[in-house]
Image (spheres, grey):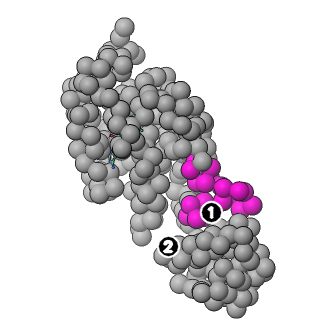
Amino acid sequence: MASFDGLPPLRDVIQRHGLDARKALGQNFLLDLNLTQKIARTAGPLEGVTVFEVGPGPGGLTRAILALGAAKVIAVERDARCLPALAEIADHYPGRLEVIEGDALKTDFEALAPQRPVRIIANLPYNVGTQLLINWLLPRQWPPFWESLTLMFQKEVGQRIVAEADDNHYGRLGVLCGWRCQSHMAFDVPPQAFTPPPKVTSSVVHLIPRAQPLPCDSDALERVTLAAFGQRRKMLRQSLKPLGGEALLNKADIDPSRRAETLSVEEFVRIANLVG
Ligand code: SAM
């Protein structure tokens, strides 16, 4: 049976190209094209947009992004076995899919995209997802080259990304994301939606860059959150001792008996600007 885009069903593609999933590459494939379309739609209108995708695998999400009208998809895939399957999609959408074989962690995405606007959409390999997100969040120049990130993570990581103060999941990732982006959990995806099913539930998270994040040096913010959340149960006067402890907190007008998880992003920025 043909799919919505006239390309063969993903199960056939996987079988024909011998794409048995490899755990070391974080391969949990999405074969339901309704679900991949739902993820792609979460990114907003795609007409005229260049989309970066990390880890297209057999191409389920890639096909949804192309069918929804993205001007171009630039996909970075580490597993060379997937390239012939992706070449079939590229033939079906002439000039609109460029596949780069390589490691996304070593890819300079900004340099690859001459055409703006850019959105990033990915069902990320779990072992590199958080690091990729941090790389996209930390460029010196802001706003960044991308307009939005629509990313699938393990649900627990998604909860850490969107967490705010006084939330159990709030930590370094929540402060960093909250500083530079507005983010929300779009929806959960149960394990059985993947082939093979992972052990945990996943979530799609959508982030858009703040136009004017509070001025702050990201290295200083990292140092403060590392110290504060490194001992998250301790009072800040204790956990931030190496950076100035009570005197630093008094200067920032923050009660030294508070704990890391109660501080807003703005308060972390205030401290970081004093240690910077
Ligand atoms: N997008 C496909 C889907 O939704 O069915 C596959 C998603 S699967 C969770 C992750 C994909 O990322 C795999 O195709 C894997 O080979 C690829 N991958 C793993 N590590 C990578 C890396 N460092 N750089 C680029 N791709 C990577």
- Residue 218's disc is 2
Rendering quarter of residue 263: bottom right
Q: Is residue 207 visible?
A: yes
- Residue 181's disc is none
Magenta residues span 157-176
Ligand 1 sits in quadrant:
top left
Relative to 4, say whether 162 is above or below: below
Residue 169 lies in the magenta-colored region: yes
Q: Taking 141 as reference, is 156 left or right?
A: right
Residue 21 lies in the magenta-colored region: no
**Residue 62: where, in percent of width, then height?**
36, 32
Q: Nearer the viewer, residue 238 or 33?
A: 238
Q: How many marks?
A: 2
Q: Residue furthest bottom?
A: 247
Rendering quarter of residue 168: bottom right
Rendering quarter of residue 110: bottom left
How far is disc 1 from disc 2 in space, using C-alphas? 15 Å
Kindly state the secondary structure of the residue where label 1 is placed.
Answer: loop
Please name the residue shown 41% across and 31% down the image. 29
Q: Nearer the viewer, residue 201 or 135?
A: 201
Please name the residue shown 48% across and 48% down the image. 148
- Residue 171's disc is 1
Please name the residue shown 54% across and 31% down the image. 191
Kindly state the secondary structure of the residue where label 2 is placed.
Answer: helix
Q: Amino acid at mark 1?
A: Gly
**Residue 143: where, in percent of width, then height?**
46, 61
- Indicate which label's residue lies in the foreground, 1 or 2: 1
